[in-house]
Amino acid sequence: MARRIILCDGAEIARLWGRIGAGEDEELTWVPREGESRARPPGFRALPGGLSAEAIARLDLKEGDGVALASEDGPWVRAAVAAIDAGAPESPVLVLTDRLGDEDLPEHPCLRRAGLRSLIRDDVDEEFDLLWNLRRLENIRALLEPRSKVGILLQPDPDPDGIACGYALRALLGRKSSTCPLISFGEVKRPENRAMVQALGLEVRTVTAEDLDEFDGLALVDVQPSVFGDEMPARVRSVDVVIDHHPERSGYDAVIRDIRPGYGATATIITGYVRSAGMEIRPRLATALIYGVKSDTQLLGRETSHQDISAFAWLHQWHSPALLRRIERPALPLDGLKALGRALSHTSVEDGIHLLVLGRVREDVIPQVADLGLQAEDAEWSVAAGIVNTDLVFSVRNVGYVRAAGEVVRAVVEGLGVGGGHRSMAKGIIPLKSFRKAYGGADRNTIRKALLEAFSKAILD
């Protein structure tokens, strides 16, 4: 586990830190001032040898450890940073001071500055979280900076979380779309997602496996290579960067992985990068990220961590409410409304499952109807199914405290098609040919009966 080494400049600041208290992974170290009493403050150890590189080396800093320097003295801080850089060059540094400005601090690739006397325990934890985010970001920048063209790969039919993260990562790398395009193996289909890229002025380029040869750098956000299954291109088996909040998968290599399944959205991880970098965040980027957090956590209502709440609160002060409204209220085509009307005329909630069979529709209509279906009284599950070309496609939503939707969909499609998803939302595709063979037909009544039985069984198993 990563440690936090707190170096306090003199007894007065050590006593101040003593009132803040020590976290579980913190080691409090006192660097006595010349002529100062050698009485060690309670809870601290002394650093023999002062700020020499040899003394710093005795701290035995490991990869991932962070160092906080608590001081109001510019020369002391500069000497401490130099000693850390000589003794443990990979360690990120947090400078805690109320009097020193950025101009008083030395150049260092991974250094942050924060206040000192206003700190409380939660502030310390957050500052170290940001420091480690900065370390990860600097590693990514160092890896990708030499590359002439970096592709940011999103999942097929990218969702708001992935789109926002791709947009933000490009900004963090300081690149333009010409040298760092957002790419996907499938086009953006859902109306709100199309509204998002249009409102933000983004382009998500649809590529083939062969197109990947033009990139000498590849980063994946909100998706891992194994998601592409047996069709995973060889170029995607070994990539530079993977940033994701889904459970970690095997079957690929990445130079840098930042996988945090405890987070409700990948946008939360990327927001941590943005905050740690101290970059100016414009309303368009803040709006994209806040919508990524909002959509993947259903407005902080499911699979939400305190990091998601913190990211949402921070982004809220910078986002554009008008731009967010444009994204969140996409048009539902008239054909889709008519299909919804027909489905509603035959719908009911049975054993907590609200099943809506739409007939032949545009694919983007299906998940919108699934979202609406969960609002029915007594519904714990909403399943919207429609025929798209030669496939039966269905979207699934649930209330979040029942069996994971992805697991249920995988059980329903086993041996017939493909599917999966999150705890509260999922998607399945079954070729009509396979469906007819298994159930004897593909008319509205057959689809309704077969799916209701399959979902009832899968939910209970």
Image (tube, rainbow, N blue to C red):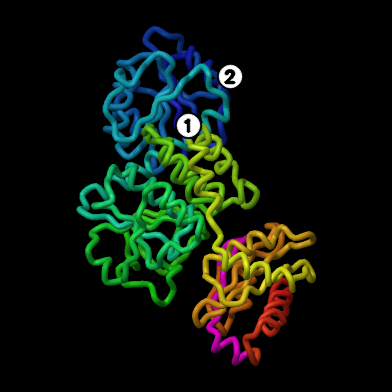
The mark total stands at 2
Pick the residue in front: 315 or 61: 315
List x then y, in percent, for residue 3. 47, 38
Residue at image position (44%, 66%) is: 250
**Magenta span includes 235:** no
Mark 1 falls on what kind of element?
helix
**Sooner in the amino-acid sequence: mark 1 or mark 2:** 2
Element type where label 2 sits in the image: helix
Inspect this view and state whether residue 72 appears. yes
Residue at 48%, 19% (x, y): give it. Answer: 116
Rendering quarter of residue 91: top left
Q: Position of residue 365 (x, y in %)?
A: 56, 66
> What is the quadrant of residue 436 in the picture?
bottom right
The span picked out in magenta is 421-438
User: In the drawing, what numbered circle is on residue 19?
Assistant: 2
Identify the amino acid type marked 1.
Glu
The location of residue 140, given as percent across then percent down, is 32, 47
Q: Position of residue 176 (x, y in %)?
A: 27, 47
**Disc number at residue 273?**
none
Kindly identify the residue that appears in the image at 44 percent across and 49 percent down.
164
Query: Dot 1, crowdedness within 10 Å: few (<14), some or many (≥20)?
Result: many
Q: Amino acid at mark 2?
A: Arg
Look at the picture and state if 226 lies above or below 196.
below
Q: Nearer the viewer's eye, disc 1 or disc 2?
A: 1
Residue bearing mark 1: 127
Q: Nearer the viewer, residue 446 or 167?
A: 446
Specify the farthest residue to the top: 35
User: Along the horizontal axis of the image, is 343 left or right of 286?
Assistant: right
